[in-house]
Amino acid sequence: MLQTLRIENIAVIEYAEIEFDKGFCVLTGETGAGKSILIDSLNAVLGSRTSKEIVRNGSEKASVSAIFSQCSDHLLKELSELGFPCDDDSVLLSRIITVDGKSSCRINGLPATTSIVRKIAKKLVNIHGQQDSYILTDTLIHHVFVDRMAECDDLISSYHILYEKYLSLKKEKENINIDESEKARRMDILSFQIEELSDADITLGEM
């Protein structure tokens, strides 16, 4: 769950740090209360596209960081495999946007690409707006819901191991076929050259 959101120099906000309690799922407020700024900040740290306009006037850069706690073992394992080990069940995402439009992302303090952050973000938070539900309409994630309902983590792990082995064997077979093709090509070239030398009827000492 989202535990802490820290914002610096985003839009009209110079600094804000918000702690969220367990069970929080709805953000409401009057027009102009700052809901959009919070959502834009959260989207930014989750890897969404941003622009330099998000940086507060007079500032060189803006930054957003978010701490997510009680993350699933599956997510923590995936992060570790991607090179972002976790000391506990928490994940720290952070992003800096400069006034010239450049940005950088980090996961647990380590540099990360926005594509990796977006991949991880889908498993950390689900933002619902008007006529808008990101994760539920993403067909690439539907299998995750089915797998969870089926409670087949062990079977999925076994499948992944076998699939990786299959890919390795497939690549090995392709390499063998390439080697055979190269061998046949070389034999054709050598046979042609031998035939040319034979037709030339070269004698000893001939230049």
Image (cartoon, helix red, strand yellow):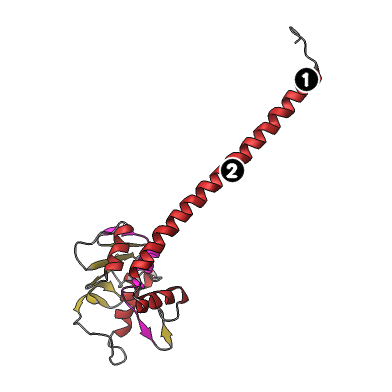
Q: Does the stretch in magenta take in 122?
A: yes
Q: Position of residue 122 (x, y in %)?
A: 36, 73
Q: Position of residue 137 (x, y in %)?
A: 45, 81
Residue 106 visible, this angle: no
Task: Place residue 103 in its image quadrant.
Answer: bottom left
Q: What is the tally of numbered marks visible in this picture?
A: 2
On the image, which quarter does residue 149 sit in?
A: bottom left
* Magenta stretch holds residue 57: no
Crowd tier of the residue under label 2, counting other residues whose Cα lies within 10 Å: few below 14, some 14–19, many 20 or above: few
Where disc 1 sits, the SS reads helix
Q: Which residue is drawn at the image coordinates 74% and 29% (left, top)? A: 192
Q: Which residue is mark 1?
A: 198
At 20% across and 82% down in the image, what residue appears?
A: 22
**Is residue 204 shown above or below 44?**
above
Q: Quadrant of residue 47?
A: bottom left
Query: Farthest top residue?
Result: 205
Magenta residues span 110-129
The spot of residue 20 in percent (x, y) is 20, 80
The alpha-carbon separation of the residues under discs 2 and 1 comes to 30 Å
State the residue in front, 27 or 180.
180
Instruction: Using residue 181 as the reference point, say whether residue 40 is left or right of it.
Output: left
Q: Amino acid at mark 2?
A: Ile
Are dots 2 and 1 in contact, CB under 8 Å?
Answer: no
Give the left or right position of residue 167, taking residue 1 as reference.
right
Residues 45 and 124: in front is 124
Question: Label 2 belongs to which residue?
Answer: 178
Amino acid type of the residue tagged 1 in the rendering: Ser
Q: Secondary structure at mark 2?
A: helix
